Amino acid sequence: MSDKKATLAIEGENAIDLPIYSGTIGPDVVDVGALTSQGMFTYDPGFVSTAACESKITYIDGGNGILLHAGYPIDQLAEQSDFLETCWLLWYGELPTKDEKESFLKVITYHTMIHDQMTSFFKGFRRDAHPMAILCGVVGALSAFYHDSLDITNEKHRSISAIRLIAKMPTLAAMAYKYSIGEPFVYPRNDLDYTENFLYMMFSNPCEPYEVNPVLAKAMDKIFLLHADHEQNASTSTVRLAGSTGANPFACISAGIAALWGPSHGGANEAVLNMLNEIGDVSRIDEFVARAKDKNDPFRLMGFGHRVYKNFDPRAKVMKKTADAVLKELGVDDPLLAIAQRLEQIALEDEYFIEKKLYPNVDFYSGIILKAIGIPTSMFTVIFALGRTPGWIAHWHEMISHSHKIGRPRQLYTGPVQRDFVPVEKR
């Protein structure tokens, strides 16, 4: 906090003193709460200049390409940690001890099964239902099965709900996929780790044995980790807003999944594959690059640059190494991946892309990896939701653990002034 103040001078009115607060790092914030008593609000569409909460979980400096989870740089976590350890870090704010980590891995492993009656929920969806539609429904439905831990004021209940959500999300995601392609559900195995289990449930079937490729499992773990949290984005803010009403955690996470489903948020890596399909062949790359440079052409290259990171996406460097390892391991001969590799080369060498800072971002590389592994584009956002779950839960828990207000944004009203009702026969 800080003793500094800002003074707002309004013509014809008394000046208003507004406190200025400082975090541990990052820009100061002006507390505009006093404006309400003066009959005014701030106007900030999209809340892009508004700090709606105080948080100790994640810090982003987009101008310098910095992403920290509880102070730890994302590249260090991606290279030296793993997804479940990062889940613990987001929840508790510290890395676990060896014993804490082993205990956490065990409890997650032994909660991956879902209640058997939940399988009947899937039968209520059409066969061609989008996996995200299914995931929204079944995650919200978890609240119908776990009445024993829905007291959000009880920290133990919050912890139990967090474990259930993190543990069961891969199972539900894989079942959504299996249902969409008409294959039988595959249940988790306790001898596999978190990401191995997800790939096993996705790709195995009762007809033949399936061995999880360790390179692919490691790549999937990095995808989950690199998407684990990203500060107050649209879906996280949605989870917080829903949670501010006192809604149960399963309903709040379902709301986050719905927000993530939007193509402007979680659909970026799917958009990359759609773009590659549109280009169609390596021989047409120059044509589409020229279109991307043409200000009068609506075509955009997806997966390049980032709204938050103005110089580079710190997650992309790790994801590039992972993509290279996956493509080398699989040796796939896919025309779309050949297009992607050529586009990457152009973006890293072409002066236009360098000047505009249109570097390949995390969505570009994750889309390539998921495509190479054999995961359909309809599942890309589901996997994003799976990875983002610990971040959503951490922000929900942080908010509930402290005094908070119910979310209630205000508006700039531009509709009709008060007028009298006119009976229908006189209109």
Image: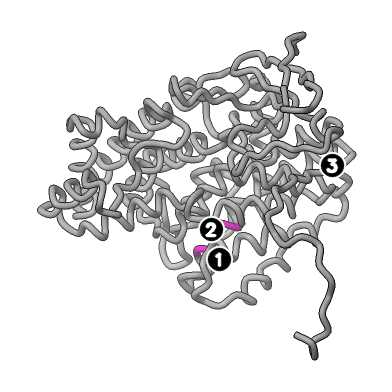
Q: Is residue 355 left or right of residue 10?
A: left
Quarter holding the N terminus is top right
**Relative depth, front residue between 355 and 272:** 355
- Write down the region rendered in magenta: 172-177
Please, what secondary structure does the residue beneath circle 2 have? helix
Residue linked to disc 1: 185
> Badge 1: few (under 14), some or many (20 or more) residues near its Cα, within 10 Å?
many
User: Residue at position x 21%, y 33% from top?
Assistant: 352
Q: Contact, CB < 8 Å: mark 2 with mark 1?
A: yes
Foreground: disc 2 or disc 1: 2
Q: Residue furthest top?
A: 3
Instruction: Tell me the number on the disc at residue 174.
Output: 2
Q: Earlier in the sequence, mark 3 or mark 1?
A: 3
Q: Earlier in the sequence, mark 2 or mark 1?
A: 2
Please, what secondary structure does the residue beneath circle 3 have? helix
Q: Is residue 298 left or right of residue 10?
A: left
Q: Amino acid at mark 3?
A: His
Residue linked to disc 3: 157
* Distance between the alpha carbons at the discs numbered 3 and 2: 26 Å
In the image, residue 358 sits, relative to residue 260, either above or below, namely: above
Q: Residue furthest left?
A: 283
Foreground: disc 3 or disc 1: 3
User: Residue at position x 14%, y 52% from top?
Assistant: 287
